[in-house]
Image (cartoon, rainbow, N blue to C red):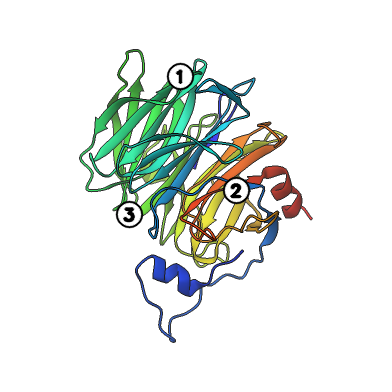
């Protein structure tokens, strides 16, 4: 979901995807209109499964590390991964996959974070309390609840964070496509939020991500495509980066994230309908995005591949054994257990796309 720089910046069948979303497919139903191929990259690791079994539960990850790794609960780690169980709460995983902490916070859907001081501020869309749940990590110890923003949307769904003009920004996406932007005040023990603006995407939307460097917000409209918004302009002046039916995305359009590599910025979007990820170079102006390619995550080293991904996140630059960056994503069908999150080496993705 979301770009964090140092300061953060296997294919499942269509039938299975439809069954998981509660839909049905008949013989006359058309297959996804995908005409662009996808390269395969090996999975690099996985987390333990979330506790909620026999359900669509794991949803969205967010990655973080410090200049010298992370001191978490008294132990040193290369980095950590936040991950939501949307039926139960928020996990903190180590990069080797172990669960380090679980916060029983209820119906959290999407999660994102931004570095602050020696640690970070995180937020998550909360469908139980109907708003944005806020958290703080001080650089050691563990993640602690740090506030809540009540919202008027019908159902909180997508969520992402950014930094605009030096202030933290939280963006809540409702399931019906309503958007609320909140400026965060982190000066006190309890983090608070003030609404900045509101607008509507159009139809059901979820995945979003912010490019702090350019003041750009990307939102995935599930049955339409990916939109690019200027945070300092009228939302009506948005640009469609890629639409369904163009051969690159198969509904639903789900998680979105950004990663910086070699001075270039890449947008990664989950094409849930055919268990793939589409990538664009978005370093230029709105409307000048360049399609790079598509990839799938294949099984490797005894870890199963990725199917039906919902949330996805990326870390720009070195983190643990990943010298060029890390991509993490939800895996809908985790062989042998409940849903979990998979890790992928960005260097392998970039190399495969450039062959």
Q: Residues within 10 Å of mark 1 (few under 14, many from 20)?
A: few
Q: Is residue 63 above or below residue 303?
A: above
- Which residue has dot 1 on it? 166
- Mark 3 residue element: loop
Q: How many marks?
A: 3
Q: Earlier in the sequence, mark 3 or mark 1?
A: 1
Q: Is residue 8 above or below residue 51?
A: above
- Which residue has dot 2 on it? 289
Considering depth in this image, is 73 or 300 the residue closer to the camera? 73
Looking at the image, do the residues carrying marks 3 and 1 touch, with CB atoms under 8 Å apart? Answer: no
Q: Gap in Å between the C-alphas at discs 2 and 1?
A: 26 Å
Residue 66: image location, x then y, percent: 59, 22
Which residue is located at x 59 percent, y 66 percent? Answer: 11
Left or right, 211 with reference to 35? left
Q: Of the numbered discs in the image, which one, if any, rests on residue 202?
A: 3
Residue 55: image location, x then y, percent: 38, 58
């Amino acid at each position: 979901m979301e770009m964090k720089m140092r300061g953060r910046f296997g294919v499942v069948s269509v039938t299975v995807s439809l069954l998981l979303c509660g839909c049905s497919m008949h013989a006359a139903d058309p297959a996804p209109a995908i005409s662009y191929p996808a390269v395969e990259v090996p999975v690099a690791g996985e987390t333990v499964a979330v506790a909620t079994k026999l359900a669509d539960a794991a949803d969205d990850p967010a990655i973080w590390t410090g200049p010298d790794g992370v001191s978490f609960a008294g132990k040193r780690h290369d980095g950590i991964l936040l991950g939501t169980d949307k039926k139960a709460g928020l996990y903190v995983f180590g990069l080797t996959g172990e669960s380090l902490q679980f916060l029983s916070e209820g119906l959290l859907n999407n999660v994102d974070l931004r570095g602050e001081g020696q640690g970070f501020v995180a937020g998550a869309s909360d469908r139980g309390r109907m708003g944005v749940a806020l958290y703080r990590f001080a650089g050691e110890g563990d993640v602690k609840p740090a506030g809540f923003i009540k919202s008027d949307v019908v159902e909180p769904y997508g969520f992402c964070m950014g930094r605009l003009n030096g202030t933290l920004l939280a963006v809540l996406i409702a399931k019906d496509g309503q958007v609320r932007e909140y400026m965060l005040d982190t000066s006190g023990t309890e983090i608070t939020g003030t609404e900045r603006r509101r607008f509507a995407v159009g139809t059901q939307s979820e995945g979003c991500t912010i490019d702090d460097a350019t003041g750009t917000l990307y939102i995935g409209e599930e049955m339409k495509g990916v939109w690019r918004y200027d945070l300092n302009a009228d939302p009506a002046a948005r640009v469609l980066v890629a639409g369904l039916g163009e051969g690159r995305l198969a509904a639903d359009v789900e998680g979105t994230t950004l990663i910086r590599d070699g001075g270039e910025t890449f947008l990664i979007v989950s094409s849930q309908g055919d268990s793939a990820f589409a990538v664009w170079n978005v370093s230029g102006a709105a409307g000048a995005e360049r399609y790079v390619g598509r990839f799938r995550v294949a099984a490797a080293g005894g870890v199963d591949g990725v199917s039906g991904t919902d949330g996805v996140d990326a870390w720009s630059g070195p983190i643990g054994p990943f010298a060029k960056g890390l991509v993490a994503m939800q895996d809908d069908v985790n062989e042998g257990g409940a849903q979990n999150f998979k890790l992928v080496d960005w260097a392998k993705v970039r190399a495969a796309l450039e062959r």
